Amino acid sequence: MKAHPYSESPRYVYKMVLPNMRVFLGQHSLRLVLLTAIALSPATVVALTQEDVCKKDVYPPLWHQAPGSIEDFPVHGNRIIISAWNYLERLGVYKILLNYSAKYFTTSGSNNILWGLPLQLGWQYRTGRLADPSNVTTCGHSAGQHLCISVRSWWASVNYYLGIIPFLGAMEAGFFGQLQHEIKILPPEELRADFCYSTADCRSHIPKVMDAWKAYFETASRIDLTANVLSDFLKIYINALESVQEIAQVRPGRQGL
């Protein structure tokens, strides 16, 4: 599936938001994660010029190498396998959500409010926040397995719930249509019990979070997201983000910064 042109316009984020993020780091790390996902969303700023869109630093790191459709992931047996602890594959999950949702933002696809999520993941990758903070492994370190996302990273664990869970919520809402294969999310090598890996699994463990993201994608697919309704739709998005807060606060054994 070719990337939708409306899904490609995040450049202003790097100019306006990211340079100021370090100022807020501290005891409010979790709230920062959620607020950043909102602040990085294109709905809050003007659209880019074509010149901006064509520049190289528009996208999260390695954006063009990430899978752009569900079919781009490997298939084993009758299952599509997604490794959420690989940076490119988790980034690909966001890319798919953007590509599938772009058509619903009819005023300007650049206003797709999901852009904040992959941009936040890209920032975490660039700043080393997805790496093993204990240095016991080389996972996520530039001199080691730089595409590895460490389950020991607090940032990476919270981001799982801001990436994989929205993806599963979209699946449950039928956002991707009829899929030819079952999708399997691979668990990490350790701390497996900290996460869920399918729509049924996540619904049994975090039903409120699944409800919130399912509602988001159901709403996105049935209304015309013009400027007149975008502010109301943003409230649904914020509710989905905030639904993550309670479970994210109890990620054990992680370094927050």
Image: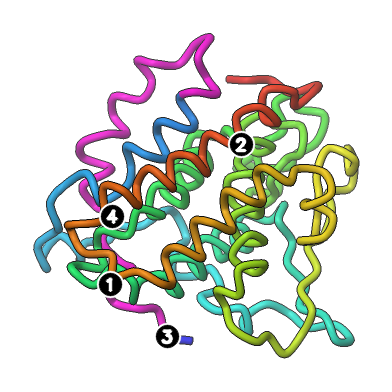
Q: Amino acid at mark 3?
A: Lys
Quadrant location, the C terminus: top right
Q: Mark 2 highlights which residue?
A: 244
Furthest residue in direction top, as rendered? 27
**What residue is rendered at 46% in x and 52% in y?**
118
Q: CA distance from mark 2 to mark 4?
A: 24 Å
Q: Mark 4 highlights which residue?
A: 10
Q: Mark 1 highlights which residue?
A: 6
- Main secondary structure type of the part rendered in magenta: helix
In the image: residue 41, left or right of residue 236: left
Does residue 158 sit above or below 113 in this rendering?
above
Q: Quadrant of residue 251?
A: top right
**What residue is rendered at 41% in x and 70% in y?**
101
Magenta region: which residues?
A: 2-31
Quick one: SS at disc 1? helix
Q: Could you say where residue 202 lies in the image, as x and y percent from the top left?
A: 78, 51
Q: CA distance from mark 2 to mark 3?
A: 31 Å
Question: How crowded is the residue under tag 2: few (<14 C-alpha within 10 Å), some, or many (20+)?
Answer: many
Q: Please state which of the two labelled residues, at mark 2 or mark 3, is closer to the viewer.
A: 2
Circle nearer the N terminus (2, 4): 4
Q: CA distance from mark 2 to mark 1?
A: 27 Å
Numbered label attached to residue 2: 3
Q: CA distance from mark 1 to mark 3?
A: 12 Å
Q: Amino acid at mark 4?
A: Pro
Q: Quadrant of residue 195?
A: top right
| Nearest the eye: 106 or 60 | 106
- Marks 3/4 in contact by CB < 8 Å: the verdict is no
Q: Please state which of the two labelled residues, at mark 2 or mark 4, is closer to the viewer.
A: 2
In the image: residue 236, left or right of residue 197: left
**What residue is rendered at 43% in x and 47% in y?**
236
| Nearest the eye: 67 or 105 | 105
